[in-house]
Amino acid sequence: MHALTSLLNALLRIMEADHNRASDSLLILCVVTFLSMTLLLGYLGNVLGKEIKPKLPPSPPQWPVLGNLPHIMRKSAALHTTLRLLGKKLGPIYTLWLGRSFPLVIVTGEETAREAFVDQGHIFSARPTLISWQYISSGYRTTMTTPAGAHWQKLRKIISHHLISPTNLARYIPVRDSEIQKLLERFRDQSRENEGVVHPLQQLRISAVDIIMRIAFGDEFATLDNEGRKGNAVVLDRLFQEIMDAGSIFQIALDSSPLTRTLLFSASRKCYSNIRTIAGQITDLVMPIVMERKRLLKERPLTEVKTFVDSLIMLKGDDALTDMEIVWNVVELMVGATDNTSHILEWIFANMITYPHVQQKAYEEVKRAMGPNLDRGLVQENHIPNLPYIQAIVKESMRRHMMAVLAIPRIASRDCKLRGYDIPKGTMVVLHAGALALNEEIWSDPLEFRPERFLNLDNEATHMHKMAFLPFGVGRRSCPGASMGLLHLHMLLANLIYRFEWGPESPGQPVDFSEKFRMVVTMKSRLRATITERSPV
Ligand code: HEM
């Protein structure tokens, strides 16, 4: 203010002064202007600088221009571990800079997760609009990708009413049972042909895909065109895996930062064109099925809706979805249901082989719950409440080998604070669920596989530490398919343990627990096991 007044006074003096003194005044004016502007800019820089530059959570040392990109771009299998260890060093919330201007905030602490995703859940329920996502979501129109708003609420409602309501889950019991029966037979055949050795993931994926395909598209699809369906299911499953590979953290870094896109122009073009190609192939496979269901519904209207796609086709008015929205919402659910279930079960069986006493205890529990069963009936959904140890094994495996280790990113929908730090609107925030699950201040010996910790209700895993075990994410955007996912995991595990004894590929051979990180953590080397059929009891 003072500088501006001086400038004004000098100007007035020029106007008042006679001609002889004008040049002196002009000189003075120049000096005063220069000094005033310097002071003014310094002052504004200081004041505004403090206002404009928010106090973000701490970050590791940054590279010039690249910020912390080298941390992310290093194609290390253990990126999630690097990020977890950074959390130990920097605290429960820290920033990674993707280039010098794009902050990515990582949450590794219990209280911070609660403050962000529960207490301020309304602010952190938005998703980033990643460029690659538009190709696999009919332009951000699927549950996972769409902005938090009316369309998203509608899609969540559709899932809870038409897919995972108790009535719907009950309707799919025959599908589940027949697919579990087929899985048991496939395992038995594979082991006979292969001197007892089986490939769990391969067989589990077939079941997971078949179950969700039949739920989504129906038995007509399964029986009318058996060969074609099988072909389609296999191709679709391969495409699902390619989509998951495309959605790596590398992809997110690429999508989020214009700098990375520029630096890696050719790699980014290749990535986007890959995703577009895969998306086109998926549309070409799924759209005809949706059209076929539409035709069937028109020809013989059903009094009772039979499949999930039927429910989507029959939505009316404001709830109605376009054909492309139907295709991509169904695909999203299919990917969620197949990839997670099969990989989690692969981790579970790796542990069953490594800890035979756990496997034995689980078998004893299922045997007790089933009672005499000479005709080899399947474990059913109503047995699950009597199988707390099976449930604990599933939980412990999901904790020890958290698959969705970095959940799915959110963004702050407005400026806010977290743990006292500034989080500007639009900042991408990632929950490191894996760091929480392995935090030694919460879990005793967190690297040990010990299902009993989920049976002890006194300390670990109690209500006090709800935020430490988040395999399905948290808050408004948490997984809407959690109950279905858990049900399938319990049913498959219980039946597979009940029917077979699981052992290593060759006697004494330890399981390789190395991890592979894409967007999720899976086993690096495919598990192989030997199975021995148990006698009926
Ligand atoms: C054991 C299996 C599963 C696991 C571990 C899992 C895990 C997750 C996680 C971590 C998220 C992100 C949550 C967040 O941002 O906080 C998520 C979201 C989602 N999952 Fe799952 N999921 C599983 C099964 C399923 C199934 C069976 C379906 C559908 C039938 C499904 C559909 C979805 C959808 C649509 C979203 C996006 C939700 C939204 O953005 O509002 N998931 N899942």
Image (tube, rainbow, N blue to C red):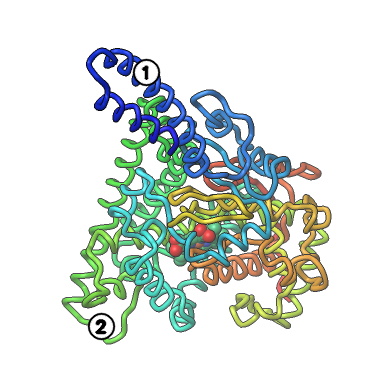
Q: What quarter of the picture does the C terminus occupy?
A: bottom right
Q: Are marks 1 and 2 in contact (CB under 8 Å)?
A: no
Q: Residue drawn 28% across and 54% down? A: 138
Secondary structure of the residue carrying numbered label 2: loop
Q: Residue drawn 46% across and 79% down? A: 165
Q: Residue drawn 58% across and 42% down? A: 95
Of 490 and 145, the residue lying toward us:
145
Residue 53 lies, with reference to residue 335, above or below; the image says above
Residue 337 in view here: no
Q: Is mark 2 within 8 Å of ligand 1?
A: no
Question: Which image quadrant is residue 517 in?
Answer: top right
Residue 239 lies, with reference to residue 496, above or below; the image says above
Q: Left of 7 or right of it: where is 183?
A: right
Judged by depth in the image, the label closer to the viewer, 1 or 2, is 1
Residue 517 lies, with reference to residue 309, above or below; the image says above
Q: Which mark is residue 28?
A: 1
Of 366 and 148, the residue lying toward us:
148
Q: What quarter of the picture does the N terminus occupy?
A: top left
| Residue type pointed to by label 1 | Ile
Residue 420: where, in percent of width, then height?
A: 62, 54
Q: Which mark is residue 302?
A: 2
First-in-chain label (1 vs 2): 1
Q: Residue drawn 72% across and 72% down? A: 463
Secondary structure of the residue carrying numbered label 1: helix
Q: Left of 308 or right of it: where is 247?
A: right
Residue 378 in view here: yes
Q: Left of 24 or right of it: where is 93?
A: right
Residue 376: where, in percent of width, then height?
A: 64, 75
